[in-house]
Image (cartoon, rainbow, N blue to C red):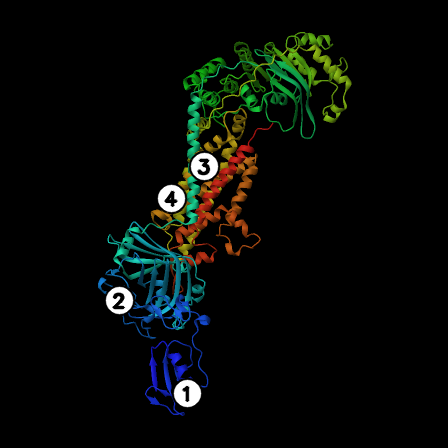
Amino acid sequence: MLHLSNAPFTVALACLILLLDLQGPRTFGRAAAASTSTVTVTVTSMFPAPSSSLSIASMSTCPVCFNCATQGCGNFGTCGSNCTCMTGFGDVDCNKPVCGSTNTENSKRLVRADGETCACDAGFVGVNCNICQSNGVCKISGSSETPLCNKSPKLFDTGSIQCGIDQPILKAAFPGTSVITLDRTLSSQSTLGALWYNNDQQFGCLMKSCRQYLNNGLYSWYCESLQCECTGKNSAFCGGKGSGIDLSGSVKAASGTFLMTCQTNSNGDAKGSCIGYFSFLQSLFPQGLPLNDCAFGECSKPSSSKQLDEVGKRGLSSGEWAGIGVAIAILAGALAGFIWSIVAHIRAVMRPVPPPKEGVVVTFNQIGYSLPNRKLIINNVSGSVRPGSVMAIMGPSGAGKSTFLDILAGKAKAGNVTGTVLFDNVVVNSETQRNVIGFVDQEDVLMPTLTVRETLMFSAQLRLPESVSFSEKRARVDDVMQTLGLTHVADTRIGGHGKRGISGGEKRRVSIGVELVTSPSVLVLDEPTSGLDSFNALSVIRTMSDLAKNFNKTVIFTIHQPRSDAYTLFDQVLVLAKGRLLYYGSGASAAGHFRKKGVPCPDGYNMADHLLDLASSDQLNRTSSLPLDMTDEMTIEEVEKGDAESARASRKLSSLSLVIPALIPVEKPKKGMKVGFFMQVKVLMGRSFKNLVRTPTLLYAHVICSVALGALVGGLYYKSGDSLAGIQNRLGSIIFILSLLGFSGLSAIGSFSIERLLFLRERSNGFYGPMSYFLTKVLFDIIPLRIVPAILMGSIAFFMIGFTNGANSFAKYISILIFFAAEIGLLCMSFAIAIHDIGTATLAGAIIVLFKMLFAGFMINQDAIPPALSWIQYLSFFRYAYEAMIVNDLVDVTIHDNVSGVQVTIPVSVVLQKFGFDINSYWRDFIVSAGLVLVLLVLNGLLVQFRLKETR
């Protein structure tokens, strides 16, 4: 009987003996065997046979030999005519470790027998004897250099690592000895990793695109991809004998990355434990696998040691580079814009101061206006106003006075405007028209927290050229206050919203002063005496008359019912009756004109009242041919049919009116010098700061409430631990914090609605551009009222609840809260901009916030959302913030609890994955949150630019 043990060609030899026996008696070895002799071969090898002993006499066929082409090579060996195994592995299928040392060619090393341990050559250790221990034991064939044994983590060429694994969860399932080996090759950037349990290999992983890094003493070996396979029938980890948990499914599906980190000392040697991170095992081991008692060994040439200093820091991924690129581009754009605005400001300051504006001739020819429903409001009104004169537009309520005035002032109208308005016989665009005209609306819309002087200075700084010095602007403001009789209230706040301030007449004069500081060529006022007593009304009219005459300005205003002494100050009067021209001429000539028409003004009767009586009644229909035979609602179609009698009457009226002076073409009015973006933002920030400081109620409310709520939440969830109840509390506390911030952000709707009308008026009058206002609004609303309270509340809650501590965790936690608070504030601001009614905007905002909160992942499992609705979760701000915050807090936490006497130890990351969260999602959620802030900033900017326009 012949016994062959540990021979790689045992099976082939058995087949050869059987073949010789079937051909007849042959001589084998030193003896000649008879035809009836029996040869017994005992095979000790890894090969699937029902018995380790083959009786040639009892076998009629040869057992199937190993074929790597059909059966494959283990441990990622390559198949040629036979398997070529990776370093440290051998046998016909590469599934067994080899012994000896790396000084021997791998194919010639002895294969370790089952159940035994390797006997390594002197100076080498490890389950497969790959790790050298000292310089004198290494041999490298074909090299004249004396080889070295590199025992540091840094790799020169080809080296091995062996570490023990001591992880409590792993120990609970597999109480034996677990060891990991890593055979690394720098030139091919590959690594063969193997996990061993009780000296048997469990599975192997081939890792590719591997690189090493050194950053402040922390050594990292990082591989971008890996694939794994179970090894042998004795793999307990893959369901074999002694299995506690069958990981075969996870091993076969393994993918992702691998990272090993080791802290090194000044000599480059490992100091303390290393940590290994398999991405496919992260749910079980979120903190990585602690690698203890690590041994590093590599036989290398001395010339290779130069690479020690060439180990660099870990490179950034393409996604990280893209994020950094976007951030740099945004910062560079912001910096370039800031520098450009500074340069533009300096250039503007150096320009010569333009001369004061003088009045111009305003000519309006055949002005008409109809609503979108084709209802006619103004019909064929013509006339002219000269510099140094005052024209009053009169008529009863509904006559079209304000509409006609808006057309003269170039205001945007919702309906259709016909006819032309010329300035010194020149048609100008709307921007130039705003620079020529100073428009005072019927309603006083002023910032209540500013003083009279500050209000006028605000207008002067934004509407006078930047080349005008601050002292000159201040002097002009003082002159305007002196002219309007406002000096005694110069430092008194305007008041409003329940706060006492200046009187109604003084507010009206401040509104006029806001326009006068720019010294406009034409001053247009809508009902300047509305709401004033007769004395203050006369004072306002006398001021306007003095302005026209003393400064050669063109003044046009509407007035409802002036007193008689005020009427005498009107140089020209234009009376409208239901949208048509009833009278246009001097105020003094009106009495004689209507006396000739048979409707004289009674003695002692106010002529202004008489004109209103005529415009309000049909009395002239029976006594004259003046065009008063109109219906209450005349449509465009009726006008287009033509009314010959009315047309003749209109021509007759024109002949009776003052003759429009001949207009000599003059130079086109120059476009006003607009204040630059830098100056706009600077002045707006100054006003916003004063407003914030002088009305601290909202700021105090946010700050006090955030501190109180932070303490309340912290007390309610105080020191939540790592038990099941503690984890539940931590999950609930985070969604509650986000909910508080979400609904408190609705106050942005109300705060913006207060300033909405003021912005519309100031933008329409050319104070500033929409982007400068929006930037200021973000700086003085989103930051102090949304972000600062979020930081205060979040910080208090963070330390009281007991979230995962550490500067890094806190910074990541606060960063997400900042993004979330900004998102909510900007979202609510967009509702305030898009929806005019504050009640509707608040309702829409509350519903949207509540609906987004539903898809955060706390109230519904994200993986259980019906496919038709699952896309909605990606629109939820709460989803990204909540996922990022719980991952930041809980991904490395392990639940320790006792349930009915049974000790429960399970990583929270497993629970989070069951809830539908991605435990690797923090930075993705961070980037998405930052992107949402940018998207909302752009959206709100576009809404401010195109939605917030004054349309009358």
Is tag 4's residue or tag 1's residue first in the polypeptide sequence? 1
Looking at the rendered structure, the kind of residue marked 4 is Ser
| Residue occupying the point 62% across, 27% down | 413
Q: Quadrant of the C terminus?
A: top right
On the image, numbered disc 1 is attached to which residue? 21
| For discs 4 and 2, the disc positioned in front in the rendered view | 2
On the image, numbered disc 4 is attached to which residue? 795
Q: Quadrant of the N terminus?
A: bottom left
Circles 3, 2 touching at the beta carbon (< 8 Å): no
Distance from Cα at disc 1 to Cα at disc 3: 94 Å
Looking at the rendered structure, the kind of residue marked 2 is Phe
Is tag 1's residue or tag 2's residue first in the polypeptide sequence? 1
Is tag 4's residue or tag 2's residue first in the polypeptide sequence? 2
Q: Is residue 746 above or below residue 24?
A: above
Task: Confirm whether residue 791 shows in the render.
Answer: yes
Left-right relation of 157 to 447: left
Which of the 4 image quarters holds residue 277? bottom left
SS assignment at label 3: helix
Distance from Cα at disc 4 to Cα at disc 1: 87 Å
Which of the 4 image quarters holds residue 492? top left
Task: Confirm whether residue 606 shows in the render.
Answer: no
Q: Residues within 10 Å of mark 2 (few under 14, many from 20)?
A: many
| For discs 3 and 2, the disc positioned in front in the rendered view | 2
SS assignment at label 4: helix
On the image, numbered disc 2 is attached to which residue? 124
Closer to the camera, 246 or 861?
A: 246
Distance from Cα at disc 3 to Cα at disc 4: 18 Å
| For discs 1 and 3, the disc positioned in front in the rendered view | 1
On the image, numbered disc 3 is attached to which residue? 782
